[in-house]
Image: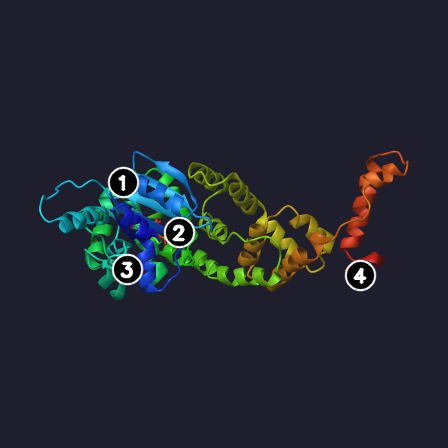
Amino acid sequence: EIGKIADNLELDVYIVGGFVRDLILGVENFDFDIVVEGNGIKFARELAEELEGEVIEEHQEFGTACVATRLGLKLDVASCRVEYYQSPGALPEVEASDLKQDLFRRDFTLNALAIKLNSERFGKLIDFFGGKEDLEAGLIRILHNFSFIDDPTRIFRALRFVNRYDFELGQITRELMEHAIDQKVVEGVSLGRLSNELELILKEETAAEILSDLEEFDLLKFFHPQLSWTAKQSKLASEIPWAERWVEELEIEEELAVWQLYLLLLVNPLSVAEAKSLLTELKISNDIIAKVEFIKESDKEKLELLREFNVQPSEVYNSLKSLSLEELVYLVIVSENTEVKDWIEFYLLELRRIELQVTGKDIIELGYEPGPCFEKALQAVKTKKLNGELETYEAER
Ligand code: ATP
């Protein structure tokens, strides 16, 4: 369908970037980056109309647009960059060099592949820089020597792809990367972009390995001078995939934000104040900052309680009730202790679901004068219920 629209408008249209890379690798990818040789916005509008979708974003100055289809798919459409050294020669060459310019601006050879979408030659792979060969050899290679200087975030992207696909850096790419790191090019990256890269890293399945690489290449200092990723953090992080499966098996309603567990481990070497100021600077949401603060200040005390021999369920409930799922899972991971895990499991599945059938309001409606003893009495009943000391307790469960 896209091909036909392109034919009608007499434009050459390609799908590029991650989609093509993952198609060749046999990995699922629903990022549709479409590049048009010509007016991309015009093409996007036409595409939206044909597909009965709509253009949800348009940037005239960049020649880009985003189309949402009726089925909920999103297609990013961009125009190729203007041709600088256009040769007045044969048309196909000019066409190709237009796309070539666009692809040459990209990060790595494996991301600089395109597939033609026009009906004529639909599906043809366009590979100017040996990207397919690098994909097959498992190599991450930049396209030119200034790549990391032009855009230092490519250093982080390289390490993400290396770990995600279990690839290696090309030799020259590695040398240029080390050189760029020595030159402290990362210092020139805005906090916003740095924060974005960190979040992308933490959201990778191989986050722990990438963090080890950041340590090895001495990149963590650009986030904070005291930040590190030690063997201890790495070992605790290796428990995260297991914890993820454990939470899944509990079949509770909340989703575990796994990347936050990596973040909590990463800021572990910092003091509460340092961690707070770093995350505030990186504009990591307040909600997570609160988690960091809470965990760093109270995890020891909570773990001690959970390890105590004679602890009552009501004490466990009171100590855990304000914690989010991520904080609870974090406690399980750092405790390395099965009793703690059992308590938290019991809390998630049972204790936090126990409710009183009576409220203060019910009692007032019966005509009793409200007073502080209400709260106390209700609290006492709840404690008994949590501890399984009320007869109704078993029956209700
Ligand atoms: P992911 O699977 O992580 O989404 P992706 O390659 O699809 O990877 P995007 O960030 O969506 O990543 O980028 C889309 C394409 O844009 C890339 O394939 C690459 O060609 C290009 N690109 C992205 N970031 C850069 C960059 N910093 N420098 C050059 N090209 C980039």
Give the CA separation, mark 2 to mark 3: 32 Å
> What element does badge 2 sit on?
helix
Give the CA separation, mark 3 to mark 1: 21 Å
Q: Nearer the viewer, mark 1 or mark 4?
A: 1
Q: Does residue 269 appear left or right of residue 134 in this picture?
A: right
> What element does badge 3 sit on?
loop
Q: Nearer the viewer, mark 3 or mark 4?
A: 3
Q: Earlier in the sequence, mark 3 or mark 1?
A: 1
Q: Which quadrant would residue 350 be assigned to in this image?
A: bottom right
Residue 99 vs 231, above or below: the answer is: above
Report the quarter where the C terminus lies: bottom right
Mark 2 residue crowding within 10 angstroms, few (<14) / some (14–19) / many (20+): many
Circle 2: residue type: Ile
Mark 3–mark 4 CB contact (< 8 Å): no
Which residue corresponds to mark 2? 201
Q: What residue lies at 22% left-to-right and 53% top-to-bottom?
A: 142
